[in-house]
Image: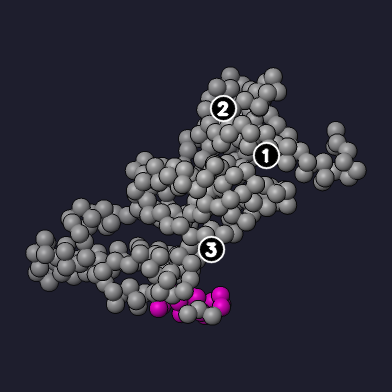
Amino acid sequence: MIRDNSSENQAELVADVCRFLRERHPQSVSLPELGARFHISPYHLQRIFKRATGISPREYGANLRLENFKANIRGGERITDAIFDAGYSSSSRLYEQSDAKLGMTPSAYRKGGAGMTIFYSAVPCPLGFLLVAVTERGICKLSLGDGPATLTADLEAEFDRAERIPDDEGVGYWVQRIIAYLEGWQPNLNLPLDLRATAFQLKVWGELQAIPVGETRSYSEVAAAIGQPTASRAVANACARNPVALVIPCHRIIRADKRLGGYRWGIERKRAILERERQYQQQATPNGESDS
């Protein structure tokens, strides 16, 4: 068991995990199993392991299988026998894992997150329930809803081929920051993201993040701000496709007539978020006066 978070103990943990994976080879070991074996959150285990080795425990195991396959082939074993002796369930698994990529590549996203590991947590929040899903790079999905079952089903549908691991402890830091924001203690959500989008969507989302807390913009104002004044409808579509509620604040976009318009996670939540942000802005301004 790791007693503290020092570099020495982290290095010892990584060495122990590598040793354990080599001993268990060719049998595969999941991240939750490793977390239970070494008494650490799967998310934290993966972060420490990847920081030290440059790859995840899953990829380390895949490398063991691939090297074993190559050694068996060099030793004269038949390809079919070498595939199964190395721990692959089929030849397709060999080709799939030997060409694995790190992170959420566009092709991985199109394939439902194939090859990705996503850690997630679904918890109560001031607006119902909150789901936060993260990869090693950052938040890949943040959604609001009425219950955890619906939110996790939506995550599964979007990333149906990813390895999805519930990890309340490991994702707890992200969850705490977001709930603090919803409760008015955290003024902004400058959090790392792991997203795949078109250049236009990224441009729109970047402009949304530049809108100050407590303020709103119309679709046409955002279109003008990104240098494409006739692209109001495209801006609206980019807002509708925002996968990370709150961090990319599409709730700050309203109609030109000042009505709230639509909101992917419910119009009442949009109204509540904007009201909380206005209250925060008033509290942050001396004597409650406007800056204008």
16 left or right of 145 in image: left
Q: Position of residue 218 (x, y in %)?
A: 66, 26
Image position of 156 with respect to 230: above or below: below
User: Answer yes or no: do the residues labelled 3 and 2 have beta carbons within 8 Å?
Assistant: no
Type of residue at label 3? Glu
Between discs 2 and 1, the one toward the N terminus = 2
For label 1, count other residues whose C-alpha is less than 10 Å away and answer few (under 14), some (14-19) or many (20+).
many
* Magenta span includes 12: yes
The residue under the point 68% across, 29% down is: 217
Q: What is the span of residues highlighted in magenta in the rendered image?
A: 4-16
The residue under the point 68% across, 23% down is: 259
Residue for badge 1: 273
- Residue 106 visible in the snapshot: no
Type of residue at label 1? Ile
Residue found at the very far right of the displayed protein: 287
Of circles 3 and 2, the one toward us is 3
Q: Quadrant of the C terminus?
A: top right
Count of numbered marks: 3
For label 3, count other residues whose C-alpha is less than 10 Å away and answer few (under 14), some (14-19) or many (20+).
some
Dominant secondary structure, magenta: helix
Task: Quote the CA–CA distance across marks 1 and 3.
Answer: 26 Å
Q: Position of residue 73 (x, y in %)?
A: 14, 66
Q: Quadrant of residue 98?
A: bottom left
User: Answer yes or no: do the residues labelled 2 and 1 have beta carbons within 8 Å?
Assistant: no
Q: Position of residue 19 (x, y in %)?
A: 35, 78
- Residue 125 visible in the snapshot: yes
Between discs 3 and 2, the one toward the N terminus = 3
Residue for badge 2: 235
Residue for badge 3: 169
Task: Quote the CA–CA distance across marks 3 and 2.
Answer: 36 Å
Image position of 250 with respect to 287: above or below: above
